Structures are given as C-alpha cells and as structure tokens.
Image: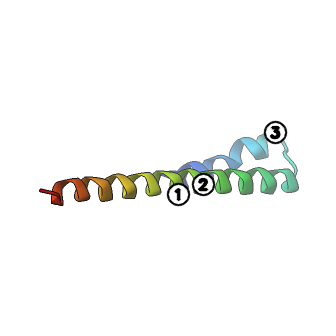
C-alpha cells in the first residue's frame, strides 16, 4: 500500500511545479521519518513479546 502512495505523491508535486531539489528533500525526509516510526514500533512490539514470554515462563 505504501509504494502506491509514494508513487501518487509525485502527481501533486508535478501539478504545483515543485522543484526537483525540493521534492527530493521532502521525499528523503518522509522516508527517514517513516523509517524511524517503523523502527520504534518494531522495538516496542519485540519488547512487549519478550516481556510476555518472560512472565509466562515464570512459575
């Protein structure tokens, strides 16, 4: 689903005649932000699963 939105975002950028440099900067910032969010979510889920497994293994 994400690649579809990433492809479609270039349409309004082209319609508004956004410069290529500005488009690249905004796209890179969005990619970095998304990477950070995904990393935080993965770490949170892994920690939660590990804590649940530890609680279940204790008598």
Crowd class of label 3 (few under 14; some 14 to 19; many from 20; radius 10 Å):
few
Please, what secondary structure does the residue beneath circle 2 have? helix
* Residue at image location 69% in from the left, 46% down from the top: 11
Q: Is residue 49 left or right of residue 12?
A: left
Residue 22: x and y, percent? 85, 51
- Image coordinates for residue 43, horizontal then vertical, percent: 46, 57
Q: Which residue is mark 1?
A: 39
Q: Nearer the viewer, residue 18 or 22?
A: 22
The residue beneath circle 3 is: 16
Residue lying furthest front in this view?
59
Pinpoint residue 38: horizontal percent, then vertical percent.
Answer: 52, 54
CB contact under 8 Å: marks 2 and 1: yes
Whichever of callouts 1 and 3 sits on the residue coming sooner in the sequence is: 3
Which image quarter: residue 59? bottom left
**Alpha carbon of mark 1 to alpha carbon of mark 3: how far?**
32 Å
Instruction: Count residues near mark 2 (Cα–Cα under 10 Å), then give few for <14, some for 14-19, many for 20+.
Output: few
Camera-side residue of 23 and 36: 36
At 70% from the left edge and 49% from the top edge, which residue is drawn? 10
Which disc is residue 13 wearing? none
Of the two numbered discs 1 and 3 in the rendering, the one whose residue sits closer to the viewer: 1
Answer with left or right where residue 25 lies relative to residue 51: right
Disc 2/disc 1 C-alpha distance (Å) = 5 Å
To which residue does mark 2 refer? 36
Give the x, y percent position of residue 58: 17, 58
């Amino acid at each position: 689903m994400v690649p579809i939105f990433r492809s479609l975002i270039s349409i309004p950028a082209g319609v508004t005649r956004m410069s290529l440099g500005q488009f690249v900067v905004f796209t890179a910032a969005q990619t970095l932000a998304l990477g950070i969010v995904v990393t935080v979510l993965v770490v949170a889920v892994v920690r939660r699963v590990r804590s649940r497994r530890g609680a279940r293994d204790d008598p």
